[in-house]
Image (tube, rainbow, N blue to C red):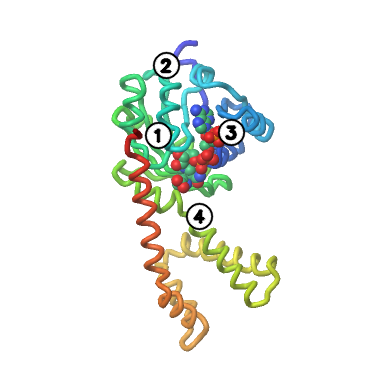
Amino acid sequence: MIAGSRRGLAVVGGGKIGEALLAGLVRQAGSGAGIWVVERSPQRAAELAARYGVGTVDLAEAAAHARVLLLAVKPQDVDALLALLAPHVAADAHLVVSVAAGVPTARIEAALPAGTPVVRVMPNTPALVDAGMSVLSAGAHATEEHLDEAEALLAPVGRVQRVPESQQDAVTALSGSGPAYFFFLVEAMIDAGILLGLPRSLAADLIVQTAYGSAVMLRDSGEHPVQLREAVTSPGGTTIAAIRELERHGVRAALIAAIEAAHQRSVELGRPQD
Ligand SMILES: NC(=O)C1=CN([C@@H]2O[C@H](COP(=O)(O)OP(=O)(O)OC[C@H]3O[C@@H](n4cnc5c(N)ncnc54)[C@H](OP(=O)(O)O)[C@@H]3O)[C@@H](O)[C@H]2O)C=CC1
Ligand SMILES: O=C(O)[C@@H]1CCC=N1
């Protein structure tokens, strides 16, 4: 196959985020539209093929067919994957996109043929519902055109931002892991409803719709979160009683410490493995 005839995308690693991106991209482009998946487990590969109508291939076939190789394996598996992938990569024919938390583009470039363009991306799972946040950084050999190509790939499943790679560990701690923090808060708020004697389904409905409405206000109102919170907080009322407890229990400090810990872990995951 000649370099220029490659098209489409191969998702390497069909786990949680690989599937979220695959699902969104197939929904936008249609199945059979030049999207392939590479999975270590044949059973998982068959499951994804049946669910999304994509072809399952091995690494050599993926590199032979696809222009974009989207690596979605755990950071701990990246080096082993790159060793298997490198013989099949052509620097002038492929764009390698990695979503692995922490892993610097320099580490990926060092394992691939000289000059291979690499774009590091931190997506998040709301890509599943076309409400993702994907943040892109260029490696040493990735041009504006490569960033445009990666952006065009991810824009159908949510918003896209570009940052210098030095900010990617912080981005990972905020928007990469971020959905989990919101799910955790929602889980706790539903538990509070149970404590107050509401049926679980009612408590879940109240909290999920409240989370959704609040997110839309945060995005669309143009107001600062403090202004939005103040508008809910009536003098001598219920909300201020709750806010006092949140402050007393250090919830603000806990969130800051949690996100700092996620950042630290991203930095650790980026260090070369022994
Ligand atoms: N989950 C999330 O919300 C996000 C994750 N990420 C990043 O995405 C990456 C994947 O995370 P996540 O989806 O959660 O992890 P998962 O473990 O769910 O998915 C990784 C998948 O890759 C497979 N795999 C490993 N090595 C290979 C290989 N050589 N060839 C083909 N498939 C392989 C794994 O198989 P097996 O199960 O056999 O190991 C697994 O199915 C990580 O680097 C993470 O940092 C980034 C943003 C958000
Ligand atoms: O938990 C993780 O390591 C990955 C990276 C960002 C979200 N999930």
Q: Disc 3 on helix, strand or loop?
A: helix
- Pick the front one: 128 or 47: 47
Label 4 and label 2: CA atoms lie apart by 37 Å
Label 1 and label 4: CA atoms lie apart by 29 Å
Who comes first in sequence, dot 1 or dot 2?
A: 2
Q: Which residue is mark 3?
A: 29
Q: Position of residue 249 (x, y in %)?
A: 43, 74
Q: Which residue is mark 2?
A: 87
Label 1 and label 2: CA atoms lie apart by 26 Å
Q: Which residue is mark 1?
A: 148
Q: Which mark is residue 239?
A: none
Q: Disc 2 on helix, strand or loop?
A: helix
Confirm if mark 3 falls within 8 A of ligand 1. no
- Pick the front one: 103 or 41: 41
Q: Residue at x 63, y 33 (%)?
A: 44
Confirm if mark 4 falls within 8 A of ligand 2. yes
Who comes first in sequence, dot 1 or dot 4?
A: 1
50 above or below 64? below
Kind of residue at disc 3: Ala
